[in-house]
Image (cartoon, rainbow, N blue to C red):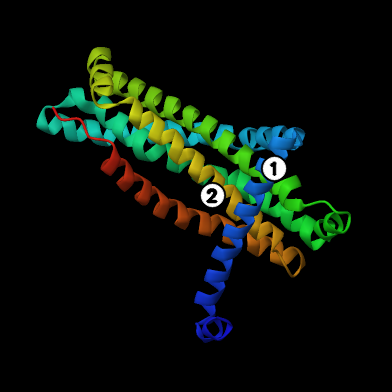
Amino acid sequence: MGAVAAALPAPLRETLEAVGGMYSMGAASLYGLGSDVVRGRFQFAEFTERSWFLVNATLLPAMLVSIPLGVAIALQVGALAAQIGATSFVGAADAIGVLREASPIVTALLLAGVGGSAVCAELGSRTIREEIDAMIVLGLNPLRRLVAPLLVAGIFASALLNLVVIFVCIFSAYVFDLAALHGTKGSFFGSFTQFATMSDFVTSEIKASIFGITAVLIASYKGLNARRGPTGVGEAVNQAVVITGIVLFGLNLIITEIFFAVVPQRTF
């Protein structure tokens, strides 16, 4: 196996090593999390602090991004609907676009760009200051003490922020539809409830949770493996944000395909 790995191109070998390292770190963190929960040793204070930090850092940017996003969806769909005489379907398009695709992606990208970068920078700073090594010398497992509560906080924060993004997007689209497109309340909410189902909402929350734990896992891995001083920490933060964006779009495609295969689509 060592000879095969050595024969691979350096970029491919480094990528495979990173994927294996993230998988191992995630598995070890979740195993430690389960063990701590069973024994009543879960780091609840660390989880609360991390959850508050992620939500507090990401809430306002999420709301500010959601307003123009909802307006843009209503504007584009409304303009097209007006041309074909189907202005009553703005709410349906908003339901499909926001619930299924937009809100989980926006939530995860903001969580990675704002909260994940801060997490990566903090863990990277601790790594280059040898605080992580000191924890290991003292017999403390950094994955169980730091990463495991972060993963749970990422799930909680992403699910909560996803709700905020959904509400703000739909509300801004509703206001714009009434004010600029001269739609009606009945047509907007009628088409919205006609096309949106509980499975769409559940899938959106599942997507956001998976994206959130992925963003936090990548940020933690890059932070704990930062090298070469402050410069290496900056590079780790940039790599974490870029890699997270690429991985999230791939995961979104996979989850969407699974959703369409498992959940039967409504016909009208």
What residue do we see at 84% from left, 54% from top?
Answer: 135
* Rendered image quadrant of residue 80: top left
Query: In the picture shown, does residue 258 fall above or below 178?
Result: below
Q: Are marks 1 and 2 in contact (CB under 8 Å)?
A: no
Q: Position of residue 156 (x, y in %)?
A: 58, 34
Q: Quadrant of the C terminus?
A: top left
Which residue is most to the right?
Answer: 138
**Left or right, residue 72 beside residue 244:** left
Q: Is residue 118 visible?
A: no
Q: Secondary structure at mark 2?
A: helix
Residue count near mark 1 (Cα–Cα under 10 Å), binned few <14, some 14–19, many ≥20: some
Q: Secondary structure at mark 1?
A: helix
Q: Nearer the viewer, mark 1 or mark 2?
A: 1
**Left or right, residue 81 beside residue 172:** left
Quickly name the residue at label 2: 214
Q: Quadrant of the N terminus?
A: bottom right
Query: In the picture shown, does residue 115 fall above or below 17?
Result: above
